[in-house]
């Protein structure tokens, strides 16, 4: 069955998870955590967040490789702290806060505004490699979206033609076209981020498979907190640069032996 | 003389400028708008609109008429709770201005009694660069005292043919008493727009809640952090030119033995140099040395260290 874009757009979802409770009676596609997810929505989310999604996420460590090289991250505890800090201090106020705005732009069919927020994501990247990861994965996901037979992209064709698009933008667009609500989009994004970082840490630190699974459990406990931080982030407070991570990523460009592109 | 309202209204298009709040007791609201124009006589300070204690000395010309050197003066020498400092610089077509300060800027400890008014301390710089305009914004360091509640915001609006070289050096904690920065809040926000497109947005927020000062990915217990932006979209249009400059800057960093304190990267055409360490003097020495390399590459002029830095 085709995922009909115009039907999605007509059924404008409540884009602010803060206020979703009041409208729970009126829209079945609402963003409540407690509302049961339909089987199809759950499967779409799993597909979008799968490590098998061909966007090349496995080739980016987002500064972690240099942090391990310098022994800033050297075991389970420091891995936990590194990823948690990134999630709550950077991803929440940047990626999640902007994903909310990107999602709202789509719900309002405001493509111009979508482009502004998308450019904002790209502008927030603190190094050449973090920017590269953003636009390379964004481009790969857009390419995939254009080739998914069941997805109708007529209303967003302008976005598919863009020279550059952020991964946050492409991910939010994909989630929207997959019929996912905003809360699922944000928590799915967090999963993708955490899963990718833990996978990189498993290779780099290195960690055992069981340690990695325990880390995934522990770190996902902070996802709801990250989403709350994003909810509270005003336009002027968007962005959370991490200075030493930014420098690690810049230094990584010259790291002698590298497994990762960032 | 224009009022603050006209000053603010001229520039409310591209950025949400924080409005001047109504005047409270014990509060300095200062604004200064400077317009530099270029003519056959070189670059001249054409217009000054001023309110409050922020001012500049007469421009002077140590390297010829084309480049006006200007010292920004703030006689109170520090910013306390409720203070707002707004600086707007208009660098008109082909004008070239080098702006620096004779002393460190200071955000003092904010008051604890919120009933007197918002304890926030705000400094905002708006820099508007027209075609072929050049701005070098090289202030001395900013000291952010323990307990401050400060925002330092820098908005740069340039065209593809303009050149911006500018830094901000932030030192956390009270220097004399060696008090760590535990209760203070400080946000450094840098935003760079090229032809109205946001190309670089860097917001570093240090708060007691996020403990960024202590975190490994944050400041890792370093009290001085700084960002030096080199933006010359047209002069450095080719990736190969930027790669060459990045290589030169990295060689200079090796010469300075600063490999573990200074990084340089090319973010979509904007070069961003960062320092993380413990000493503002050291940071200024490094940045000055890197400016010596970046300046000729961007504007084809050698760098002359401003005299005031020696005093």
Image (cartoon, rainbow, N blue to C red):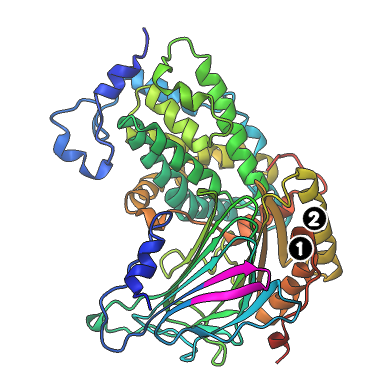
Note whether A157 is above or below B219 in the view shown. Answer: above
- Which residue is rendered at x = 48% and y = 29% of the image? A49
Query: Picture coordinates of residue B243 (x, y %)?
Result: 79, 49
Secondary-structure class at tag 1: helix
Q: Magenta residues?
A: B35-47
Please state, as top left, top right, bottom left or bottom right, where the N terminus of chain B lies in the image: bottom left
Give me the C-alpha separation between circle 2 and circle 1. 7 Å
Q: Which of the two discs, 2 and 1, labels the residue nearer the N terminus?
A: 2
Note whether B48 is above or below A18 in the view shown. Answer: below
Instruction: Say which quarter of the image contains residue A210.
Output: top right
Q: Are marks 2 and 1 in contact (CB under 8 Å)?
A: yes
Nearest to the observer: residue A251 or residue B132 = B132
Looking at the rendered structure, which numbered label has been put on residue B245? Answer: 2
- Could you tell whether A86 is left or right of B16 in the image? right
Nearest to the observer: residue B250 or residue B290 = B290
Please state, as top left, top right, bottom left or bottom right, where the C terminus of chain B lies in the image: bottom right
Q: Quick one: which residue is furthest to the front in this view?
A: B40
Secondary-structure class at tag 2: helix
Looking at the rendered structure, which numbered label has been put on residue B294? Answer: 1
């Amino acid at each position: 069955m085709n995922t009909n874009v115009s039907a999605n757009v007509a059924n404008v979802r409540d884009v602010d998870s803060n206020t979703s409770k009041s409208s729970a009676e009126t829209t079945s596609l609402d963003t409540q955590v407690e509302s049961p997810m339909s089987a199809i929505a759950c499967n779409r989310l799993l597909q979008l967040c799968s490590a098998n999604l061909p966007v090349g996420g496995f080739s980016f460590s987002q500064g972690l490789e240099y942090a391990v090289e310098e022994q800033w991250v050297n075991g389970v505890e420091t891995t936990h702290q590194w990823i948690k800090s990134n999630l709550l201090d950077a991803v929440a106020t940047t990626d999640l806060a902007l994903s909310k705005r990107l999602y709202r732009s789509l719900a309002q069919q405001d493509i111009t505004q979508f482009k502004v927020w998308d450019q904002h994501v790209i502008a927030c990247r603190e190094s050449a490699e973090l920017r590269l990861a953003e636009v390379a994965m964004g481009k790969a996901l857009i390419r995939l979206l254009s080739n998914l037979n069941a997805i109708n992209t007529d209303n967003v064709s302008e976005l598919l033609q863009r020279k550059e698009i952020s991964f946050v933008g492409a991910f939010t667009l994909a989630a929207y076209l997959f019929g996912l609500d905003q809360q699922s989009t944000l928590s799915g994004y967090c999963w993708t981020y955490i899963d990718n970082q833990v996978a990189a840490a498993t290779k780099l630190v290195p960690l055992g498979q069981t340690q990695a699974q325990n880390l995934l459990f522990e770190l996902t406990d902070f996802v709801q907190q990250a989403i709350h931080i994003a909810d509270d982030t005003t336009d002027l407070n968007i962005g959370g640069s991490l200075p030493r991570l930014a420098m690690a990523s810049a230094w990584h460009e010259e790291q002698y032996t590298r497994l990762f592109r960032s | 003389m224009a009022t603050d309202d006209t000053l603010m209204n001229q520039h409310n298009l591209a950025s949400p400028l924080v409005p001047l709040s109504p005047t409270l007791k014990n509060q300095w609201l200062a604004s200064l708008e400077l317009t530099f124009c270029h003519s056959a006589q070189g670059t001249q300070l054409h217009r000054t609109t001023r309110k409050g204690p922020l001012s500049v000395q007469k421009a002077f010309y140590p390297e010829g008429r084309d480049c006006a050197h200007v010292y920004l003066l703030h006689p109170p020498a520090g910013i306390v709770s409720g203070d707002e400092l707004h600086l707007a610089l208009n660098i008109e077509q082909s004008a070239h201005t080098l702006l620096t300060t004779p002393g460190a800027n200071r955000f003092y400890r904010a008051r604890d009694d919120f009933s007197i008014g918002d304890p926030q301390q705000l400094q905002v710089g708006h820099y508007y660069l027209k075609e072929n305009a050049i701005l070098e914004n090289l202030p001395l360091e900013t000291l952010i005292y323990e307990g401050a509640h400060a925002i330092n915001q820098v908005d740069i609006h340039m065209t593809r043919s303009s050149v911006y070289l500018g830094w901000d050096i932030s030192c956390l904690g009270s220097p004399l008493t060696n008090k760590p920065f535990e209760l203070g809040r400080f946000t450094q926000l840098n935003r760079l727009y090229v032809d109205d497109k946001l190309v670089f947005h860097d917001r570093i927020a240090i708060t007691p809640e996020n403990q960024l000062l202590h975190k490994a990915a944050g400041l890792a217990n370093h009290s001085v952090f700084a960002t030096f932006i080199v933006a010359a979209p047209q002069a450095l249009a080719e990736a190969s030119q930027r790669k060459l400059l990045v290589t030169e800057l990295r060689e200079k960093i090796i010469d300075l033995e600063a490999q573990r304190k200074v990084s340089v990267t090319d973010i979509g055409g904007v070069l961003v140099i960062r320092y993380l360490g413990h000493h503002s003097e050291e940071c200024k020495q490094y940045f000055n040395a890197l400016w010596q390399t970046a300046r000729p590459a961007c504007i084809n002029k050698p760098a002359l260290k401003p005299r005031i830095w020696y005093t």
